[in-house]
């Protein structure tokens, strides 16, 4: 996501209002208007207390004008939030019902639309999604809150010409560890390098390429031969494609020998979850 330039108080207020649910911005606008309107009352003249007269006039002047400025900003933010939500749903449905080849489905969306699409994808999977305010928060584009209140970080890469390298995954993993997040996702419209996939193996960081993302949105996973492994089935669902997960043992990397849950659709889906004893 592009970094936002330095903005004014009104612009920041509008940004906050546009990120709230539209109905909440409307409620805030109404409450603020009636609160400020209640303060926009000409103070009584008290010759014995001129200081209170001055402070009362200041409150009156501020409240009188702010009631016509602040609530409308929240109403405009509510309109922006409503149409943004409508666009997110429309983007997801366009991908879900698009009949063009998988490699062409994401070709027409912009980088901003791709982030909106990814955010809506996670919303449908039950996460609460927050977009980062500056778009450069350690490379984090989205923050997810699961039903168990655990936090997951998401970085979106709208790359078509080149594969996402291991450096991107490694940096995100460092941010995940530093912030004590439960996990992280790197989502790209393209593909990942072999080094990036090898680094993510055994860690609670999921790589979702364009083919996997489109397949998950459409409700079907790409067909692939499953590896012949001995595993223990579980009732845990994959955080990427919602398929059943199996208990596996990491064979390499810093987590070698540790057990984790891996998606039964591997290698088409590389979703993992930690195994907690």
Image (spheres, rainbow, N blue to C red):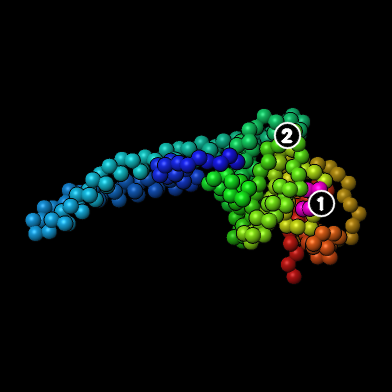
Question: Which quadrant of the rendered structure holds the C terminus?
Answer: bottom right
Question: Which quadrant of the rendered structure holds the N terminus?
Answer: top right
Disc sitting over residue 88 in the figure:
none
Q: Nearer the viewer, residue 96 or 179?
A: 179
- Residue 58 at least partly seen: yes
Q: Mark 1 vs mark 2: which is more N-terminal? A: 2
* Secondary element type, mark 1: helix
Magenta stretch: dominant SS?
helix
Looking at the image, which residue is at 83% across and 63% down? 256
Q: Is residue 218 above or below residue 227?
A: above
The percent coordinates of residue 147 (x first, y second) are: 61, 58
* Magenta residue check for 81: no
Q: Is residue 188 above or below residue 31?
A: above
Disc sitting over residue 160 in the figure:
2
Q: Nearer the viewer, residue 81 or 48?
A: 48
- Residue 250 at least partly seen: no
């Amino acid at each position: 996501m592009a970094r936002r330039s330095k903005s004014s108080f009104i612009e920041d207020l509008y940004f906050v209002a546009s990120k709230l649910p539209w109905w909440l911005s409307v409620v805030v606008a109404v409450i603020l208007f009636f609160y400020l309107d209640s303060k926009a009352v000409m103070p009584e003249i008290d010759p014995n207390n001129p200081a209170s007269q001055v402070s009362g006039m200041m409150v009156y002047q501020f409240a009188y004008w702010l009631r016509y400025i602040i609530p409308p900003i929240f109403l405009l933010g509510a309109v922006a939030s409503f149409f943004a939500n409508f666009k997110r749903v429309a983007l997801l449905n366009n991908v879900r019902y698009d009949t063009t080849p998988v490699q062409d489905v994401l070709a027409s969306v912009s980088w901003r639309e791709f982030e909106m699409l990814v955010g809506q994808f996670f919303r449908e999977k039950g996460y609460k999604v927050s977009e980062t305010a500056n778009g450069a928060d350690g490379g984090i584009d989205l923050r997810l809150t699961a039903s168990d209140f655990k936090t997951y970080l998401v970085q979106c890469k709208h790359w078509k010409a080149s594969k996402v390298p291991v450096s991107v995954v490694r940096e995100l993993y460092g941010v995940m560890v530093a912030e004590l997040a439960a996990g992280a996702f790197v989502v790209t419209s393209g593909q990942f390098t072999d080094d990036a996939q090898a680094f993510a193996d055994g860690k609670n960081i999921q790589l979702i390429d364009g083919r996997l993302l489109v397949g998950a949105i459409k409700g079907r996973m790409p067909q692939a031969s499953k590896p012949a492994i001995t595993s223990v089935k579980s009732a845990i669902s994959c955080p990427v494609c919602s398929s059943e997960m199996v208990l596996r043992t990491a064979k390499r990397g810093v987590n070698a020998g540790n057990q984790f849950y891996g998606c039964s659709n591997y290698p088409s889906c590389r979703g993992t979850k930690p195994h907690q004893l």
